[in-house]
Image (tube, grey):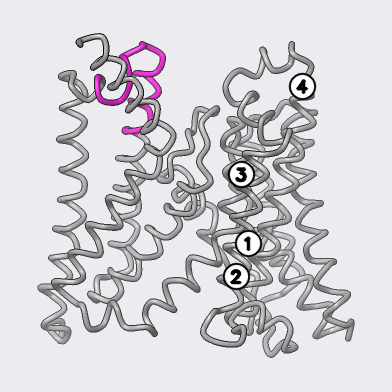
Amino acid sequence: MAAGDTQAVRTLNERIEPYFAIIGPMAMILALLLFMAIVEPARYFRWSNVNLILLDAALYMPMAMAMTFVITQRGIDLSVGSIAALSAIIMAFLIKQFGFSVYFALPIALGLGALMGLVNGLIITRFNVPDLIGTLAMDLVYRGFALVIAKGLVLARFPELITEIGRGRLPGLIPIPVVIGIATMIAGFVLLRRSHFGRYTIAIGSNPEAAELTGIAVNRHKVYAYVLCGACAALAGVMLTGKLNAIQATSAPYFNLHVIAAVVVGGTSLFGGRASMIGSFAGVLLLSMMINALVTLRIEFFWQSVASGVVIVSSVALYSWMQKKDRDGAGGLIAALMTSEGQKLTRFSAFIIGALILLLAIGAIFAGNPQASG
């Protein structure tokens, strides 16, 4: 009987483990929804606000999909914001200043994003520059090019195709950016689970040396991941241009941190080898919902950064602990949670969720007196 119970527990562990990556963000989403249902149900759950959340999340979905592959391979790309801005600026100049058709300028922008991703990948693999330093340096380069080209101009009023990509709707109520974002996440899920590239990505992140010995072209697949990330950043730049119907060189300054946060919160390990495309999708939704909640409660912009940082730290701590337990052979998730360390981490996670709710409560209190400063 005891043996049967042990086998049942192991079977339960095996079933739970693949989905544990999304438990964290889903629990936070549920806590956020419950809190807002009590504090601001009328404003937060009205369709116009839900539409804003979806439009904001859709902007980051393509980049989150591509960043999942980069981070799973033990990489990082800090240049996605500058790639998005530079690609969109060049597209805007081709359309507004030189009179090119949008059907010519749009593919040029996407191709330019892929090219910048290729440059990132070659710098990292050919010159052995660490991912963090290489992409940070290229972020400065791409942003500098955007500033030089734009010369302080704000380019606006684009053709209908661009605005449709950024804020249009299909017949009915479905926003086109949401369709694009979800489509890229589905494509990323299939690529991660059903393709050689996805399997090689997991292998490279788990052990690059062993992957090399098995015949996987590690450097080539790293370059592929950065090319994909650059192209998706350019797509996000086009979507941002359409959403605002304007673009300038300083646009998208925090794209990199927002996307990395969403991917990490979703369960993709910064140490490589663990990826969850569904988790990345949940992470994007969580951050967009959280920022929208802070805005709804009239909390200052700076507190949005505090909340995002708290979520990132807690998520990295949780998933680092999970990987440690995997290496130590703790006997699965349930057995690991029963240890003293697991109970401490459980209490820590509860504290983090409580801190976020308290932060929202502070905003709700001060929201009742918006003119206190006057």
Counting residues from the N terminus, which is met first, the one under dot 4 or under dot 2?
Answer: 2
Q: Which residues are magenta?
A: 317-335
Mark 4 vs mark 2: give the one in front: 2
> How far is mark 3 from mark 2, CA to CA?
25 Å
- Measuring 50% from the left and 41% from the top, which residue is drawn there? 276
> How far is mark 4 from mark 2, CA to CA?
34 Å
**10 Å neighbourhood of mark 3: few (<14), some, or many (≥20)?**
many
Q: Which residue is mark 4?
A: 216
Mark 4 vs mark 1: give the one in front: 1
**10 Å neighbourhood of mark 2: few (<14), some, or many (≥20)?**
some
Q: Amino acid at mark 3?
A: Asp
Measuring from the top left, give residue 238's x and y in whole percent.
68, 71
Counting residues from the N terminus, which is met first, the one under dot 4 or under dot 3?
Answer: 3
Label 4 secondary element: loop
Q: Which residue is mark 2?
A: 179
Q: Which mark is residue 234?
A: none
Mark 4 vs mark 3: give the one in front: 4
> How far is mark 1 from mark 3, CA to CA?
22 Å
| Front one among 330 and 76 | 330
Q: Amino acid at mark 1?
A: Ala
- Measuring 76% from the left and 27% from the top, which residue is drawn there? 219
**10 Å neighbourhood of mark 1: few (<14), some, or many (≥20)?**
some
Q: Which mark is residue 77?
A: 3
